[in-house]
Amino acid sequence: MSQALVADVIQFSWVDGPGNRFALFLQGCNFDCKGCHNPQTIPLESIHARTVTPESMLDEIKRAVPHISGVTVSGGEATLQPRFVYELFAAIKADPVTRLLTTFIDTNGSAENDVWELLLPVTDGFMIDLKAFSDTLHIELTGKSNVAVLHAIRYLSRAGKLYETRLMLAPGINDSDEELRSIAAWLLSVDPAMRIKVNHFHAHGTRHPASEWPEADDERKAHYATVLRSPPSGGTPRRLPMASSIPTTFRRSPRSCARSPSDCSGW
C-alpha cells in the first residue's frame, strides 16, 4: 500500500469543488508560484507534514461522510503522489460507506499523460489552475512553462473529466486585456461550454513580492467578466459559462480557509 505526505486536512470545505467537501492537501509542489498562498506546502518534505496511507485516510473520510458530498485532493500538487491518490479514490469508490462521494483533484496541470491515464478511471472531476496564457508570463510567475498545463486542459476536457479551469487574476500582474482575450479565445476553442472560474487574488499568507500585490476592486472584477466575454473583431459576445465571482482560491492556506472563502484567495 502506498503512502503520502499530507500537509493538512479540512474536513468540511465549500471552496474545493462542488458541495461540502473533505479537502486533503498533499505536501510538495513542482511549481514555485510567486503568489502561492500556502508556500509551506511547496517543499517535497516538511517536518510539519504527516505520513498517511489510503486506508488511514479513508477512515478519516468515513467519519465526515454524513456531512460531505465528496473528497478533493489538492496541495501542494496532488499529481506528484499519483499512486496514493489512485488508491485512495479507488478505495472510496469500493467502500459502501463512501462509494457515493465524488472524487476531485485540484491540480496545476503539469502531469504527464500516464498520470492522467492512471487517475481518470477513479476521478470524477479535475480542476486546473491556469496562471497565465502567455508562456513567458507563466514562467515568470511559476518558474515553469505552461505547455503541459494547456495540454492537460485539452486532454482532460476531451476525456469529459475537466470540471473547471480556474483563473487567478491579480491587477497589473496577469490581468491585461490582451492576456484575458487570449485565454478566452483559446478556452472557447477547446470547449465552448467549458466552466471557467475567475478567482481574485488576495495577499493574505503570500510571500514577498506577492504580499504587496494589489487586490481587484469591484469595478476591476466586473471588467474581467466583460473582457473575457467580449467578442473578437466585432462578433457576437462569447457565451463563456463563468462560475460565481465570489473570491475563492486556487491555492489556499488550509488552516485559514475553512470559515470564509473571502479569506482564502491566493495562488
Image: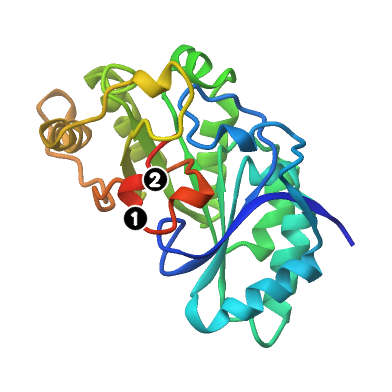
Give the residue drawn at x 60%, y 30%.
148
Q: Report x, y in % for residue 21.
A: 49, 67
Query: Label 1 is placed on what type of residue?
Result: Ser
**What's the residue at 71%, 44% (across, down)?**
48
Density class for disc 1 (Cα within 10 Å; few <14, some 14-19, many ≥20) is some
Residue at numbered disc 1: 260
Q: Position of residue 198 (x, y in %)?
A: 31, 41
**Residue bearing mark 2:** 264
Res 145 quadrant in image: top right
Q: Residue at position x 72%, y 41% from top?
A: 80
Q: Residues within 10 Å of mark 2 (few under 14, many from 20)?
A: many
Disc 1 vs disc 2: Cβ atoms closer than 8 Å?
yes
At horizontal 40% and vertical 42% (from top left) the residue drawn is 166
The single residue placed furthest to the bottom in the displayed view is 96
Viewer can see residue 192: no
In this orientation, which residue lies closer to the viewer: 19 or 159? 19
Task: Residue 169: tell me if it is visible.
Answer: yes
Q: Secondary structure at mark 1?
A: loop
